[in-house]
Image (spheres, rainbow, N blue to C red):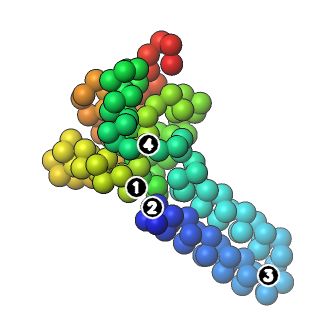
């Protein structure tokens, strides 16, 4: 769990330091702008930007029942963030597994990617797809989703 928060904490710390330097130099407007920018970056790269993650076993079980794809992701991955943002509200209809929080999820991704932990890996009907187009992923949702 702590690895998922490393990048957001670094963004917050770096932003606070840069903002403090600008504030001391007398540029309070620049300091506030920098702080807001780094807070936004921290939020986007944190687990908070993604729907609640579940374990790989639970995601696979749910997917077998409802037919929804499973998305394996990790915080700080720009491709995961791109997928999440471009899916918009449709993202909540997928089963999300954070591979940094779930060792079984990381193992599933390594099994699908020749030993690499390449994310996002989307599993649809037992077939893994690495970094698929968000429009394609949206099209894989069942009509009732």
Secondary structure of the residue carrying numbered label 4: loop
Relative image position of residue 48 (x, y in whole percent):
58, 51
Answer yes or no: is residue 135 visible: no
Task: Name the mark on residue 23.
Answer: 3
Alpha carbon distance from label 1 to label 3 = 37 Å
Q: Mark 4 or mark 1: which comes first in sequence?
A: 4
User: Looking at the picture, how far across and down is residue 54, in whole percent?
Assistant: 43, 42
- First of labels 3, 2 by sequence position: 2
Q: Which circle, 1 or 3, is nearer the viewer?
A: 1
Q: Earlier in the sequence, mark 4 or mark 3?
A: 3
Evaluate whether residue 67 shows in this view.
yes
Callout 2 secondary element:
loop
Q: CA distance from mark 1 to mark 2?
A: 5 Å
The residues bearing labels 3 and 2 have C-alpha atoms spaced at a distance of 33 Å
Q: CA distance from mark 4 to mark 2?
A: 13 Å
Q: Which mark is residue 101?
A: 1
Disc 2: CA contacts within 10 A as few (<14), some (14-19) or many (>=20): few
Contact check, label 1 and label 2, Cβ < 8 Å:
yes
Q: Which residue is mark 2?
A: 1
């Amino acid at each position: 769990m702590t690895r998922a928060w490393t990048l957001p904490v670094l963004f917050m710390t770096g932003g606070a330091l840069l903002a403090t330097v600008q504030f001391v130099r007398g540029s309070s407007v620049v300091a506030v702008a920098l702080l807001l920018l780094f807070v936004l970056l921290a939020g986007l790269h944190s687990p908070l930007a993604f729907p609640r993650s579940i374990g790989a076993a639970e995601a696979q079980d749910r997917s077998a029942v409802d037919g929804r794809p499973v998305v394996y992701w990790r915080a700080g991955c720009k491709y995961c963030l791109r997928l999440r943002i471009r899916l918009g509200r449709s993202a909540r209809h997928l089963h999300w597994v954070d591979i940094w929080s779930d060792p079984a999820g990381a193992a599933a991704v390594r099994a699908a990617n020749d030993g690499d932990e390449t994310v996002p890996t989307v599993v649809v009907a037992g077939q893994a797809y690495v970094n698929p187009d968000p429009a394609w992923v949206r099209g894989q949702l069942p009509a009732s989703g």
